[in-house]
Image: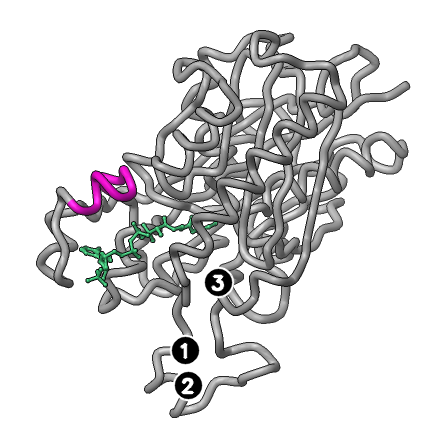
Amino acid sequence: MLNAKISGIASFVPEFKLTNDDLSKMVDTNDEWITTRVGIKERRILKEPEAGSSYMGIKAVAQLLEETGTKAEDVDLLLCATSNPDYRFPSTASVIIHGCELKNCYGYDIQAACAGFIVALQTANAYIKSGLYKKVIVVTAEKMSSMTDYQDRNTCPLFGDAAAAVLIEPTEENIGIIDGVYHVNGEGLPFLLMKAGGSAEPASHETVEARHHYVYQEGRNVYKHAVTDMVESSKDIMKRNNLTVNDIDWFVPHQANLRIIEAVGGRIGIPEDKVLVNIQHYGNTSAASIPLCLDEYKNKLKKGDKVVLTAFGAGFTWGAMYIVWGI
Ligand SMILES: CC(C)(COP(=O)(O)OP(=O)(O)OC[C@H]1O[C@@H](n2cnc3c(N)ncnc32)[C@H](O)[C@@H]1OP(=O)(O)O)[C@@H](O)C(=O)NCCC(=O)NCCS
């Protein structure tokens, strides 16, 4: 039976660093509050004029092609997970496909908020296993600064910009994407959303004045669900695959808040040194956070390592995946 494995990974972050001290000059906050409540020290911000998420996605995909020695014309499918598309239409996937000259490639966007990477990976897995496509790129590109309100101290420390991409290919070895559990319940809508700009509340002077084109979040509620749901889905995937905490080499949770990461790892009982964390440097980069973290630690990961990923995002949408590292 064919398996789908991650055969390459790359990422891109903008140069500009927005520190906690910078934020304390913009809103009523300070480094101590942000560090203890969220664990973030700095985040990257894309400053290039008129550059959207695709700018970073193109950089990440170009790097991926170079590192894996993949010819642009050989890529069959590109899935772009983003909550910050360049445009409402066309898809950001189409902009990236054009920008990277993927001439024989089909593609589309996937909207699953911060769970976008694991959702897109599962879609790529299905295409590879079916035999339909042989070289699939999952790219996550999130210009979170485009929807962050830098007058709102409750949300502006949390987010950063980044892109990351993985190449997925078939293998007959018993490695790659082994299993995934996914949930969407729709109950999270009032607690985490961008209220305007969609068809429910199209853009108008009033929506701009009401600051409805930024992330709206009721943090405590989201926090509670994020912890419970990532713990439950991680336990579920471990049980289904007969994995104990000792069997797992690496645990990679969505990077939204260091306290959430520690609470999830602690409740499952995973030793801290197996939990991959890079939120302090980048903040919450939404769908990009898991592959950005995997890319940062890729020299530690060895072929055959057992890895559990878990993510939680707006919707609510959440789940966990079990993969055996294949690079
Ligand atoms: C957002 C979050 C960090 C807030 O932390 P919290 O401990 O829940 O803090 P609260 O929202 O209860 O606010 C506590 C106080 O700090 C204040 N505060 C909020 N942001 C602040 C900031 N940047 N600096 C200083 N004070 C701040 C609040 O105004 C509140 O003050 P009050 O008690 O006088 O009203 C936390 O709820 C969180 O991480 N939620 C989940 C976010 C998440 O994961 N989102 C993405 C999911 S994909």
Amino acid type, mark 2: Thr
Report which residue position mark 2 lands on: 207
- The segment highlighted magenta reads 33-42
Q: Is mark 3 within 8 Å of ligand 1?
A: yes
Q: Residue at x 36, y 30 (%)?
A: 278
Q: Residue at x 34, y 63 (%)?
A: 148
Residue 203 located within the stretch drawn in magenta: no
Image position of 312 with respect to 308: above or below: below
Q: Residue at x 52, y 49 (%)?
A: 225
Which picture quadrant has residue 145? bottom left
Residue 85 as seen in the image, left or right of residue 101: left
Report which residue position mark 3 lands on: 192
Q: How much space separates mark 2 and mark 3, taking CA atoms?
A: 17 Å
Residue 55 in the image: state x and y as whole percent: 45, 52
Q: Is residue 75 visible?
A: no
Q: Badge 2: few (under 14), some or many (20 or more) residues near its Cα, within 10 Å?
A: some
Mark 1: secondary structure: loop
Asked if disc 2 and disc 3 are in contact, CB closer than 8 Å, the reply is: no
Q: Earlier in the sequence, mark 1 or mark 3?
A: 3
Mark 2: secondary structure: helix
Q: Nearer the viewer, residue 66 or 233?
A: 233
Report which residue position mark 1 lands on: 212
Q: Nearer the viewer, residue 242 or 95?
A: 242
Image position of 205 with respect to 191: above or below: below
Residue 259 as seen in the image, left or right of residue 54: left
Image position of 327 with respect to 140: above or below: above
Residue 176 in the image: state x and y as whole percent: 71, 20
